[in-house]
Image: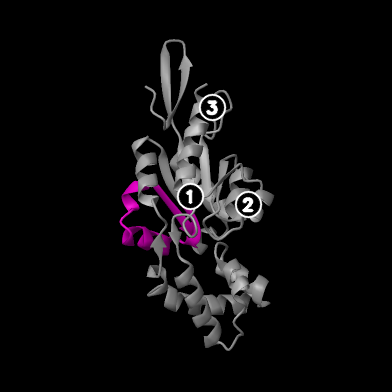
Amino acid sequence: MCSIGMAYIKRGIEEIIMNKTIIFDLDGTLTDSKEGILKSLEFALEAFGYDIPPYETQLLFLGPPIVDSLQQHCGMTIEQAEEVYKKFGERYGTIGKFENQLYPNIIDLLAKVKNEHYTVALATAKPEIYAREILDHFSITPYFDVIVGANHKEGLIHKKEILQKAIDLCGNPLTDDTGRRLVYMVGDRKYDVVSGNELGCISIGVTYGYGTEKELIEANAEYLCEDTDDIVMTLDLEEMLIRR
């Protein structure tokens, strides 16, 4: 009865086991998708004769919705941005989504949390259909209990509403009876951290992805992790605190 992945609450002689939840971002957290996204972005911009932004600006497209980034960084109207995004999808949806690779030791991390009875979820601003295809491509879909991505028909576009749906579908409480939090949000950009904090999660910012350490600190990440070993240590530390 001392599994690292469970929080235990004693009520008299009864012991209620409450599953903990861990929710991962995809791009920059589980997979390095930079090549496919940036090549597809250049393809779409060139198709309409737009200038290609500097590489440093292109990196800012990694994480938030592409339509938002096109408006913010390329000065487009929403109509222009949606037109370019449609072109982006022509390449990304066929080639770009697989110009991608898992970060080191991701499968070991997923296996650990699954074996320790976490409810494991994905919450990504990438369209859900692409997210599922990418998880299938890397044969990691079986590790996930819940998968939520962007879905314009459902009004799921930005990270906070996507994360909220993932939390709801997981069906686990945010806290135990003592108020200790039981849900983790792991991501590489400020959008992950801010959304996680606002929704009552323990926020873990990973510095091996696309967000900078400065960005994650300013977003008030509770933990910063340089690699998957750090994530494991953070989960174990939190579990020790819960069981004290």
Residue type highlighted by circle 2 = Leu
| Residue 104 lies in quadrant | bottom left
Visible residue check, residue 129: no
Q: Closer to the N terminus: mark 2 or mark 3?
A: 2
Q: Which residue is mark 1?
A: 227
Residue 242 pos. (x, y %): 52, 26
Q: Secondary structure at mark 2?
A: helix
Residue type highlighted by circle 3 = Leu
Q: Can residue 145 be found in the magenta stretch?
A: yes
Q: Which residue is mark 2?
A: 216
Give the CA distance from mark 1 to mark 3.
22 Å
Q: Can residue 129 be found in the magenta stretch?
A: yes
Give the CA distance from mark 2 to mark 1.
15 Å
Q: Is residue 111 above or below residue 41?
A: above
Bounds of the magenta span? 123-150
Visible residue check, residue 213: yes
